[in-house]
């Protein structure tokens, strides 16, 4: 027994004698101590963790081939071969750079998503912003770079007209994304905001992936996985809707049928416009999703709608009701897309879409019909060479068929334009403080037999934790207006050059942003004696300011937007460069929301203002030499959670009843005094009132339609 005890102590002593102590410190590349770093001897269980001062120390019985490894979340792992254990081991870890940790390029980009990092606007903002009435475009018009053109309703970005903004649905182009209407009567985006988990809105300098837009891109991304089965019923002062969602293990489907009719509303509240038949629309849609394991998803979407309106528009200098205009519109949009991981570090995305739009137009005894069909197919591959370097490349084809017919004279004209494009873009996250993106896009149009190369470049630098400086530049092109292509099919495409610089400072609850830009136009269509020629040019220079705060005042969220644009262009029938009517120089939006917990209510208000719209006074010398009075509108809303599954929503646009004027319409011929009679272009009514009750039926008692308000 004594011999056994002696042997045990001799063995323990020998073991202690053979152990070595490994110690040192770990810091960042900037020399800051890193706590919580896991430091261990490779191939063993020996190791330790650094303390608050970055120091570590541990023992090991291994005396040769000492390879010490240091690992820490957010940093690249590092190892050292140690020949002398008595020497201090020093690690300098480099911050791991990938797409998530790197600085984001913010120049010209506004992210409207559910991502935690998205501060500018989230999907819920789209439906709770006063004045927007749950219209995606209406909400975006409170953001920097946009101009409020309230008698139109579409997106006008940085001095560009509405056709210069391209709209994409799950990566695929949408044709005729707004409802058909007549001059002076505002329209709406065709898609329900509740469909989308996020919106990418670029006011310029956007990726080489997108083309066919001189000013802006609006990319809508549908929800991947609904959270529950539920049925939503909506009872509104302007119509009814019923929607239902069924969720399975790997698939889901959402469907909605909606009917809106402004005729009962027009009977109750006096309007400034003379409607024979106020706008009414019947719309149905369905969205199907199927998960491909954990590696991808397939989506299919279909929307069909029909709408009608008949309006009498008074004519200056003429008696009676004026000109009778009737519009009968049918619209269809189908979209099929997929996204899948096809190999390690490879992602494949693609799909196809088809937009069909037919307008039957009657102007007094004249009858016209236009048919517009847009087919889009696209394939994109993304390869991650490393976590910090990726390549995005792809190809797409767009086929547009357009036909215009005079049904009385039995005359028609049409064209087909096939647009094909290749694009490639490299994005390098050089560090967590520097990102660089460069791309090239090649476009070919069959109608004018024209090929264009469009280089794009952008970069972002983070000078400190909450600050980002971004720059973006590029060349962009777009086909001419369809009616101009009908008359001059071989006319060259329009072009624009973008250069913009932005600074952003912000946290999760407060953000400030300023962005300046220069935009040049060339090859704009100008009317000549021999038809249209791509001879026009112009510019749009300015800056945007944005501030949002949801932490200074308890339960309060507000943002302020100011945009200045100096825009002039020679286009269409103008002989000189003029300031377009859709580009007021000064634009201001102030949006506020306040949550009242005791009342279960979310009231909100939006004030919109601009410096007025230019117009061409036929009684004065010059072109677009006059400006309307400034535009101003205060809109309010109130959402009340009556029950967990029942919401009452009330909204009033232009609650103060300000009479806004957007310009003037002039008679075709002067009167006996040599003066052209005029008529103001006003708004449909002094105010617009909306009341809705939204009821959700679901086993999940917390479900409601707050996102649909």
Image (cartoon, rainbow, N blue to C red):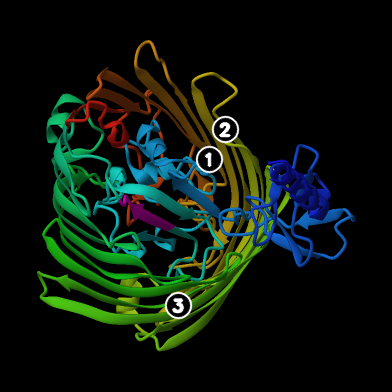
Residue marked by disc 2: 509
- The region drawn magenta spans 218-224
Can you tell which quarter of the image residue 327 is in?
A: bottom left
In the rendered image, the quadrant that contains the N terminus is top right
User: Seen in the image, is 469 located left or right of residue 117?
Assistant: right
Give the total of numbered labels.
3
Q: Secondary structure at mark 2?
A: loop
Q: Residue furthest bottom?
A: 449
Tell me the tag on residue 36.
Answer: none
Residue 135 in the image, given as x and y percentages of width and height: 33, 42
Query: Residue 662 magenta-drawn?
Result: no
Residue marked by disc 3: 493
Pick the front one: 88 or 561: 88
Q: Are marks 1 and 3 in contact (CB under 8 Å)?
A: no
Q: Are marks 2 and 1 in contact (CB under 8 Å)?
A: yes
- Residue that appears at 90% across and 56% down: 87
Give the dominant element type of the magenta stretch: helix, strand or loop: strand
């Amino acid at each position: 027994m004594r011999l056994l005890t002696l042997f045990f102590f001799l063995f323990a002593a020998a073991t202690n004698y053979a152990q070595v102590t490994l110690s040192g410190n770990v810091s960042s590349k900037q020399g800051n101590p890193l706590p919580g770093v896991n430091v261990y001897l490779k191939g063993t269980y020996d190791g330790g963790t650094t303390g608050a001062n970055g120091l570590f120390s541990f023992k090991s019985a291994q005396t040769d081939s000492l390879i010490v490894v240091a690992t820490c979340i957010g940093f690249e792992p590092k190892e050292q071969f140690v020949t002398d254990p008595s020497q201090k081991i020093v690690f300098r870890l480099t911050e791991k750079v990938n797409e998530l940790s790197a600085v984001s390029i913010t120049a010209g980009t506004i992210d409207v998503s559910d991502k935690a990092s998205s501060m500018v606007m989230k999907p819920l903002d789209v439906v709770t912003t006063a004045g927007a009435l749950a219209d995606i475009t209406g909400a975006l018009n409170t953001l920097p770079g946009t101009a409020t053109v309230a008698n139109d309703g579409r997106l006008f970005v940085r001095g560009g007209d509405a056709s210069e903004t391209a709209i994409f649905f799950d990566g695929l182009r949408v044709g005729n994304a707004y409802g058909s209407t007549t001059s002076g009567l505002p329209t709406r985006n065709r898609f329900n905001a509740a469909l989308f988990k996020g919106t990418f809105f670029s006011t310029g300098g956007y990726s080489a992936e997108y083309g066919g837009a001189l000013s802006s891109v609006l990319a809508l991304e549908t929800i991947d996985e609904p959270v529950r089965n539920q049925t939503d019923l909506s009872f509104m002062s302007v119509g009814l809707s019923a929607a239902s969602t069924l969720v399975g293990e790997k698939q889901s489907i959402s469907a909605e049928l909606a009917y809106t009719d402004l005729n009962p509303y027009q009977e109750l509240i006096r309007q400034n416009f003379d409607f024979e038949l106020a706008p009414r629309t019947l719309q149905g849609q369905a969205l199907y999703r199927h998960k491909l394991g954990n590696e991808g998803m397939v989506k299919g979407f279909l929307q069909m709608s029909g709408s009608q309106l008949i309006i009498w528009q008074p004519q200056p200098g003429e008696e009676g009701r004026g000109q009778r205009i009737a519009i009968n519109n049918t619209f269809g949009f189908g979209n099929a897309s997929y996204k899948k991981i096809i190999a390690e570090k490879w992602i494949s995305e693609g799909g196809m879409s088809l937009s069909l739009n037919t307008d039957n137009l009657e102007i007094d005894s004249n009858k016209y019909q236009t048919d517009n069909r847009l087919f889009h197919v696209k394939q994109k591959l993304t390869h991650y060479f490393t976590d910090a370097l990726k390549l995005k490349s792809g190809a797409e084809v767009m086929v547009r068929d357009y036909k215009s017919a005079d049904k009385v004279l039995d005359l028609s004209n049409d064209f087909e334009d096939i647009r094909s494009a290749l694009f490639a873009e490299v994005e390098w996250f050089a560090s967590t403080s520097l990102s660089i993106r460069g791309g090239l896009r090649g476009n070919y149009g069959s109608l004018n037999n024209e090929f264009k190369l469009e280089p794009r470049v952008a970069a972002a630098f983070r000078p400190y934790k909450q600050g980002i400086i971004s720059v973006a530049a590029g060349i962009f092109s777009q086909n001419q207006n369809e009616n101009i292509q009908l008359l001059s099919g071989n006319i060259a495409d329009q072009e624009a050059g973008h250069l913009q610089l932005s600074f952003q400072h912000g946290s999760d609850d407060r953000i400030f942003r300023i962005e300046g830009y220069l935009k040049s136009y060339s090859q704009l269509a100008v009317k000549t004696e021999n038809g249209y020629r791509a001879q026009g040019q112009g510019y749009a220079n300015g800056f945007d300011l944005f501030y949002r705060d949801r932490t200074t005042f308890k339960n309060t969220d507000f943002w302020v937007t100011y945009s200045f644009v100096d825009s002039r262009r020679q286009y269409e029938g103008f002989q000189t460069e003029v300031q377009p009517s859709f580009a007021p120089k000064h634009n201001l939006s102030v949006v506020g929301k306040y949550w009242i917990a005791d009342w279960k209510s979310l009231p909100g208000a939006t004030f919109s203002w601009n410096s007025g719209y230019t117009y061409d006074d036929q009684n004065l010398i010059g072109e677009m030499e006059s400006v309307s009075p400034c535009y101003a509108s205060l809109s309010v809303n109130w959402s009340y959670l009556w029950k967990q599954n029942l919401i009452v929503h009330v909204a009033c646009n232009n609650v103060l009843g300000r009479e806004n004027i957007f310009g003037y319409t002039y008679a075709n011929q002067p009167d006996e005094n040599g003066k052209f009679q005029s008529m103001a272009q006003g708004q449909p009514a002094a105010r617009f009132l909306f009341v809705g009750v939204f009821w959700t039926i679901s086993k999940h008692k917390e479900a409601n339609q707050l996102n649909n308000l």
